[in-house]
Amino acid sequence: MASTTPPSDSVPVTINGQTIDPQETYAQDAAHTNYITIGVYDVLSIGQEVHLERLGVSIRENLGEGIYLCYYEAKDLSSIRELDFIRQVDVYRNKFKIQVDLGAPTEETQLGSQVFNRVAETKEEECLVDVMVHEEVLGEISEVAERISECVHVPADELRVTESKVRLRVKRTLLPLIASDDRVRMIEEVVPIVLHDDVARKIVNADITLEGLPFRGRGQRVAVADTGFDRGDLEKCHPAFAGRVRALLPVSRKGLANDPHGHGTHVCGMVLGRDFDTPKGRIGGVAQDSELVVQSLWNNEMRALESPVDLKNLFWEPYELHECRIHSNSWGDAFADSSGQRHYTDAAKHIDKFVWDHPETFICFSAGNNGGPDRGPTIGAQAAAKNCLTVGASGSTRVNEPGKNAKTNFSPGEVLVTSSRGPTVDGLIKPDVVAPGFNIFSAQSTDPKAAWYGEQTDCPTEPGARWKPLSGTSQATPLVAGCVAVLREILHTKGVENPPSVLLRCLIINGADHLPGIPVEAQGFGRVNLTSTASMLESTIFTASDASQNPTLPAKSGCLIGPALKQGEVFRFALNPKDIDGGASALKVTLAYHDLPGSKIQNNLNLIVQSGNSLEYGNGGSAASPDVQNNVEQVILDPIPQTEILVSIEAQNILANSEQSFAISWLTSPPASKGD
């Protein structure tokens, strides 16, 4: 049997914000669990992963810092601990299962008759939680729910059970009893979701014409999940949407999709609202030839939003039944100063998994409106997902009406003070980009229950119709969703019928303009510029075979859909600087890939750009310390070298039986401004 003495070089393990030091507690065996954590000295080779599999160790998730969560049915740990590439092996402890903001359990317990007798008649505050199970036992979710009901004395009819989780209200002191079931993977608190509350179109250069043809999202369908749509009627609606709404999908109210709040209608107008001339200027959306599918999350009883227990259901219906490939969300978990940013949640996991399983799906979330002077990172829980595009809010050229506590203007080169800053708890650069979100006019709901106050405007030719200004990341996000619809239309004309969403994300990020003097924590990779982004589609959309047949690709602008790489593989191509216009002095290269679900990067790719003897690693990394936290990496060469530029994508750490695809884009521009 294995020893309970930990190795002298063991390292603490942190999962869900809970930390355990092997020097303080170390398992002798795995007699009471099928889940263990292993620590390794270096990146696992394919041979080492195969060796572990032969011992019965199946890696389930890369937890970062050389720690992996694994499935292991045997009891004896000695055969694993004896391997020279293994640093430490311990069991997946119950404490890890309870996210730190719920309060850490004080002891390890096992389910049994003695546990039932310890159910305290305490008056402690109850909390609403989701209990997630391990992948291997998804088929036992009903049995898990029954066990939970018995051990914490919550009636079975008060539990909400889905195919992957159990939701219940329970006393915090009883969480360790739930965690002691080996089938439980994680317990997290359910937090109410909140809203993240034309001139903007000009700022992002969204009016696109290529080869004399205008692009406004024709043939594209965008899903918006929000408070609802206008009166809830496809025909009798605000004139901004005439003929553009394909379907209304009630989510939180049976049979009702109207918008008594007004936020959802405003957001929809940002995506595709028709142009109308008003006293405030021309107001309209970005992708006016696209179609809309609206999901209403408004709950009348709660007077608030309510999302599905399993978030994947929110994405599945518009994807499968209405062929929507763009999903815009201007909401997220309520932010609490007492707990701060949330650790990787089940909602973020569902977002990452849906995009991984449906690679054509482009999901965007607003970053949140919880920024402020001297505040730290405040990115929303959903917005912290690796595979969504997270949007912050920049200023506009409009001036707000004076208010007691309101700033009257934020210029296009500023980021709103309230726009949530990054990075995420796991170190991701978020937001990805920013877009105008200050004093943005859009359609006002005509629902009789929609109460509006403050500034409004109208159109002489449309009596009764109104437009209203709102500010926040809520407004920036649908603007970007409309830009994505335009990009998809352009790609369709180029023969790319089902463009991977990672290509669209890569293009949006690489085309963004850096805002001088604004830290990356506030603006991410910059403010969206659709004209710059579309310029990368003027030539061929390259593939891996194109790169292999052409020794050198044109360096002025372009993009490439990369091959799937396995552990240790490297993909290379060259750029020829000789075709670059004389006025350009900077070359920007961006790598993007959508990763497997998990709090840390599961399949890590690195971007390396070489010219002569100079090597530049993505996001300012180095050969000794490459970026292993982000699935978007960028290199800016300023000035542009005169020698051939070699671009390499290195599969630095890929899980066994997995491979990682990617997209890469490049663009020349005037000299890049250096930010803080």
Image: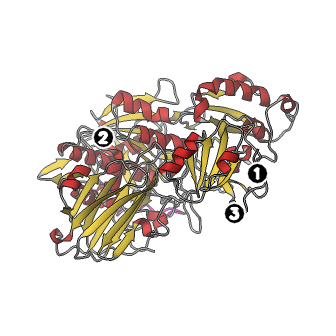
Query: Marks 2 and 1, Cα distance to the nearest angstrom?
Result: 64 Å
**Residue 153 percent location from the top left of the image:** 79, 28
Q: Quick check: 430 left or right of 135?
A: left
Q: Which residue is drawn at 32% across and 33% down?
A: 245
Identify which residue, 229 or 469, lies in the foreground.
Answer: 229
At label 3, which amino acid type do we have? Asp
Figure quadrant of the N terminus: top right
Q: Is mark 2 on a helix, strand or loop?
A: helix
First in sequence: mark 2 vs mark 1: 1
Magenta span covers which residues? Answer: 397-407
How many callouts does the rendering have? Answer: 3
Identify which residue, 112 or 369, lies in the foreground.
Answer: 112
First in sequence: mark 1 vs mark 3: 3
Check residue 542 for magenta coloring: no
**Residue 213 percent location from the top left of the image:** 13, 49
Residue at numbered disc 2: 240
Q: In which quarter of the image is residue 578?
A: bottom left
Residue at numbered disc 1: 26
Q: Which residue is drawn at 81% across and 45% down?
A: 107
**Residue 87 percent location from the top left of the image:** 65, 57
Q: Mark 1 Cα within 10 Å, few/some/many (few <14, many 20+)? A: some
Q: Quick check: 512 left or right of 84?
A: left
Q: What element carries label 1?
A: loop
Q: Mark 3 Cα within 10 Å, few/some/many (few <14, many 20+)? A: few
Q: What element carries label 3?
A: loop
Q: Quick check: 364 left or right of 120?
A: left
